Image: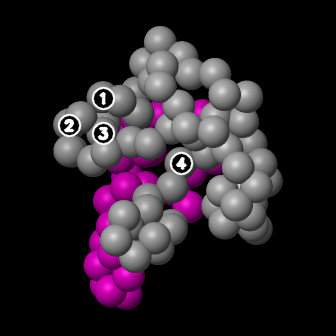
Amino acid sequence: MLKKVSDTIGINVFVYSFDGAGDAVFPAVLPTTTDILNNFFAELPKVTPTDFIVNKDTLVTIPLSQGAISEEALVQRLNESFTLADHMGVL
């Protein structure tokens, strides 16, 4: 579902893995380092899946969702997050 949504709206997905294993949809994953955990999960439980929006130029990170959510909920969260980030000037 994440792949479908990301392809539809044209955003890149970078997959990090706690155990280094990918899956059928995202077979290539990046290792989760201590720095990644500290930066992304400083105030969040370390659970999967967890989705973030990250500005690749400024590295501003916005938590998007934790746990399994529907496609509709993901699209809604993306829309809300992009609108708020644009309003605040952080992305």
**Residue 55 locus on image (x, y percent):** 38, 67
**Residue 15 locus on image (x, y percent):** 50, 38
Quadrant housing residue 41: bottom right
Q: Is residue 9 visible?
A: yes
Q: Is residue 90 magenta?
A: yes
In this figure, which residue is indicated by the disc labeled 4?
Answer: 51
**Amino acid at pointer 1:** Lys
**Amino acid at pointer 3:** Ser
Is 82 rendered above or below residue 74?
A: below
Pointer 4: residues within 10 angstroms few (<14), some, or many (20+)? Answer: some
**Residue 65 locus on image (x, y percent):** 56, 51
Distance from disc 3 to disc 1, alpha carbons, whole Å, reads 6 Å
Q: Earlier in the sequence, mark 1 or mark 4?
A: 1
**Amino acid at pointer 4:** Asp
Q: Element under label 4?
A: strand
Q: Element under label 3?
A: helix
In this figure, which residue is indicated by the disc labeled 3?
Answer: 6
**Would you say the residues marked 2 and 3 are in contact, meaning their CB atoms lie under 8 Å apart?**
yes
**Would you say the residues marked 3 and 1 are in contact, meaning their CB atoms lie under 8 Å apart?**
yes
Q: Earlier in the sequence, mark 4 or mark 2?
A: 2
Pointer 3: residues within 10 angstroms few (<14), some, or many (20+)? Answer: few
Q: Element under label 2?
A: helix
Q: Is residue 2 left or right of residue 20?
A: left
Mark carried by residue 4: 1
What residue appears at the point 72 percent right and 36 percent down from the top-left corner? 18
